[in-house]
Image (tube, rainbow, N blue to C red):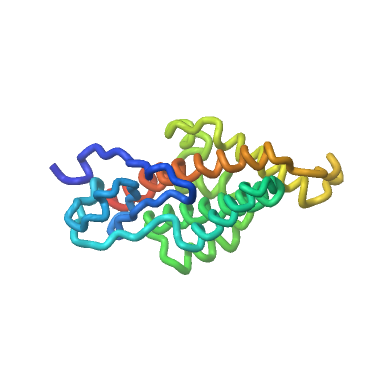
Amino acid sequence: MRPSEKPHKTVFAESSDGAPTYWECPSCGFLSGDPRFLDLEHACPVCGATGVERRRFPSDRVRRLDHRIRDYQSQGDGEIVVILVMALLETILEDIVDRMMEAQGADLKVRRVVMDSQRSIGVRIGKLFPALAGEEFEEAAEELGYRDFPKRWRTMREARNAFIHDSPFNGPRERLDAEMGADAMVLLDQAYRLFVLLNNRFVADGKHRS
């Protein structure tokens, strides 16, 4: 039986006080939190690759930002937490969308042009993701067990935007409290798991089938 025909299950990273640690198969992009994946002789469950060093996910840049966010959270600074969590989620989404385009054969130049021309997070979620995945972001999230995530993320983005920008329709939002900061941290921890699942479904599987 070929590796692509074997059922595989995403192993989530163990809980920690910071960003989770996943390891990426450089051959197909599969992400796993299974410590055995560090063993070069442990075959990738998607493409079967062995003997190739696995890369850490998320990147060091994202991990540094995650660390700063958790420091602000420990200080009770809900406003900074919400603003930075929303920025971090947009960064991770950009990474996943870029991976999806690469899995479908787009080279770096094409991917850069697409991302530069569609900078809005709403457009990336509402138009670019469905064009690549063949289904809406909300549908994919629900199928993967995160039905409420898109709505909660959208609500949090709207609160962030209202706080930063004066709205001619609803007026400014004066504050983002500690409770909203705590909600943002829950959303962040869920986002790591959801985006790993999205990656393994639309990137790793897509690359191997191609």
Q: Is residue 180 above or below residue 107?
A: above
Residue 70 x, y percent position in the rendering: 57, 50
Seen at 54% across and 44% down, the residue is 188
Q: Is residue 161 left or right of residue 21?
A: right
Q: Quadrant of residue 7?
A: top left
Q: Is residue 96 left or right of residue 43?
A: right
Residue 108 x, y percent position in the rendering: 44, 67
- Screen quadrant of the N terminus: top left
Can residue 105 be seen here? yes
Seen at 73% across and 48% down, the residue is 161
Can residue 133 be seen here? no
Q: Is residue 188 left or right of residue 172?
A: left
Residue 149 x, y percent position in the rendering: 55, 35
Residue positioned most to the bottom = 109
Seen at 44% across and 46% down, the residue is 16
Residue 112 x, y percent position in the rendering: 51, 65
Seen at 44% across and 55% down, the residue is 58
- Number of numbered discs overlaid on the protein picture: 0
Residue positioned most to the left = 1
